[in-house]
Image (tube, rainbow, N blue to C red):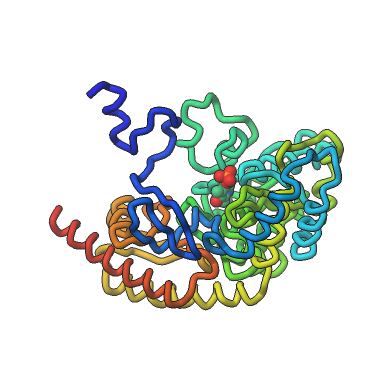
């Protein structure tokens, strides 16, 4: 075996794809709702939904129809022109949120880049160009662009990419005293996920988000929420910040579920926070093109429905109750359940990567997460019946994990 192939055998061999992913040798050819059909004919229950992307399930008939119809009309023009679909989706998003204006991109990272640029430009516009500091938190994930990895609270993402960018500060998760001590005359913004996703489904305490909002008001600091994962009804409300009175942001990044699987991201802001973003400040070639906007509008029409949010709370309630039983029956495997709505973290005592494999052996797909968690991120329209099927599979995965741990001891 050559050195090259020996290295690649740790993951799925691929000669021509940059080796940045640890891939499972499993490929799918079709999806329907919460089911994924593998190329080998096996059927899987999907409780990760492309990491919170396929929120309305695979091959959602409404989205498929809208995509087909739009594909026959117009895909792309350019942001030089007026794009009616952008205006319609921006109106729907601003009607439903704190925001007045929206910038459309194609991913979460791009939404984050826009959020950071918007915050700094605001202070520049106010005659305070020294307000550059972006305060983020340990365990956070904001994406993989150079700006986003500097905002993220995981030093491993920065390794080998040169010195960290100046003016990015990281504090402990949930440490309000540290925030109070750090916010000052050079602070531009605080950036946080109301419920951390990749970090392991950790929700900020409600009362603390209100304290942070108040501190931002007192100090003229902008508050940026990253609701790329926890937003769009996954928490059981349209946005996770709605669970807390008076804790809305000035700027918010969203993506993932927004296109239901089609790449769409957006940065939402108040008119005040966005006042520095004028002609020439920012842009994106593909961002908000007619095809993306058609699918985005159709997806958002579903995601915004109160019935969907009620359903999410019901299914989440079922999971929470069942999972607490799992903690009791498998105290040697499961340590804790956390998260909000259908962003559920299961903190394990056995290795999470192995547990994901045990779940896959049961034909259940779940996501990994920081802090030795696995995450359940099912389509939001998962039925209680499917949820109970997922629980039975998780129970068997716990049995396997227990047996493995005993054999190793
Ligand atoms: C996925 C994610 C991102 C990055 O989104 P991309 O579309 O991969 O660029 C940023 N923040 C959070 C919270 C995410 O979950």
Q: Nearer the viewer, residue 104 or 160?
A: 104
Q: Nearer the viewer, residue 84 or 331?
A: 84
Q: Is residue 225 above or below residue 382?
A: above
The answer, for residue 161, to whether it is visible in the render is yes
Rendered residue at 29%/69% (across/down): 395
The answer, for residue 339, to whether it is visible in the render is no
Rendered residue at 25%/64% (across/down): 332
Q: Nearer the viewer, residue 327 or 214?
A: 327
- Looking at the rendered structure, the number of numbered marks drawn on it comes to 0
Instruction: Locate residue 195: give its quadrant.
Output: bottom right
The quadrant of the rendering that contains the N terminus is top left
> Hey, which residue is sitting farthest front in the picture?
72
Rendered residue at 34%/76% (across/down): 325
Q: Is residue 53 left or right of residue 2?
A: right
Question: How far from the left and from the top, in percent, is residue 394?
Answer: 33, 66
Question: How far from the left and from the top, in percent, is residue 171?
Answer: 55, 46
Q: Is residue 46 left or right of residue 105?
A: left
Question: How far from the left and from the top, in percent, is residue 60?
Answer: 57, 63
Q: Is residue 403 left or right of residue 319?
A: left
Q: Is residue 386 above or below residue 125?
A: below
> Hey, which residue is sitting farthest top in the picture?
2
Rendered residue at 86%/37% (across/down): 279
The quadrant of the rendering that contains the C terminus is bottom left
Instruction: Locate residue 54: give its quadrant.
Output: bottom right
Question: How far from the left and from the top, in percent, is residue 39?
Answer: 37, 51
């Amino acid at each position: 075996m050559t050195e090259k192939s020996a290295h690649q055998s740790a993951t799925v061999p691929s000669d021509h794809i940059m080796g940045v992913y640890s891939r499972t040798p499993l490929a799918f050819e079709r999806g329907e709702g919460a089911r994924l059909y593998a190329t080998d004919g096996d059927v899987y229950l999907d409780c990760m939904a492309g990491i919170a992307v396929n929120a309305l399930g695979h091959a959602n008939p409404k989205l498929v129809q809208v995509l087909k119809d739009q594909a026959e009309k117009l895909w792309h023009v350019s942001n030089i022109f007026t794009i009616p679909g952008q205006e319609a989706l921006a109106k729907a998003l601003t009607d439903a949120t704190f925001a007045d204006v929206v910038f459309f991109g194609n991913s979460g990272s791009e939404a984050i880049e826009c959020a950071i640029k918007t915050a700094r430009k605001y202070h520049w516009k106010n005659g305070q160009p020294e307000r550059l500091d972006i305060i983020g938190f340990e365990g956070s994930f904001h994406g993989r662009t150079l700006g986003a990895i500097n905002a993220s609270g995981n030093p491993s993402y920065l390794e080998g990419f040169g010195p960290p960018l100046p003016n990015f500060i990281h504090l402990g998760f949930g440490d309000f005293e540290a925030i109070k001590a750090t916010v000052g005359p050079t602070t531009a913004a605080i950036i946080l996920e109301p419920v951390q996703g990749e970090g392991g489904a950790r929700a900020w305490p409600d009362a603390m988000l209100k304290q942070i909002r108040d501190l931002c008001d007192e100090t003229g600091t902008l508050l940026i929420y990253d609701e790329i994962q926890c937003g769009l009804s996954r928490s059981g409300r349209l946005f996770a910040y709605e669970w807390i009175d008076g804790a809305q942001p000035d700027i918010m990044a969203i993506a993932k579920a927004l296109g239901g699987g089609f790449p769409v991201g957006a940065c939402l802001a108040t008119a005040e926070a966005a006042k520095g973003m004028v002609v020439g400040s920012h842009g994106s070639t593909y961002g908000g093109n007619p095809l993306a906007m058609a699918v985005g509008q159709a997806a958002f029409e579903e995601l915004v429905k109160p019935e969907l949010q009620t359903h999410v709370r019901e299914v989440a309630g079922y999971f929470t109750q069942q999972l607490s039983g799992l903690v009791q029956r498998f105290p040697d495997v499961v340590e804790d359940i956390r998260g909000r709505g259908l962003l559920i973290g299961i903190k394990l005592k056995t290795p999470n990567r192995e547990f994901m494999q045990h779940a896959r052996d049961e034909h259940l797909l779940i996501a990994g997460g920081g802090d030795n968690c696995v995450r359940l991120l099912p389509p939001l329209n998962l039925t209680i019946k499917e949820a109970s099927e997922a629980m039975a599979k998780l129970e068997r995965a716990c049995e396997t994990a227990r047996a493995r741990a005993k054999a190793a001891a």
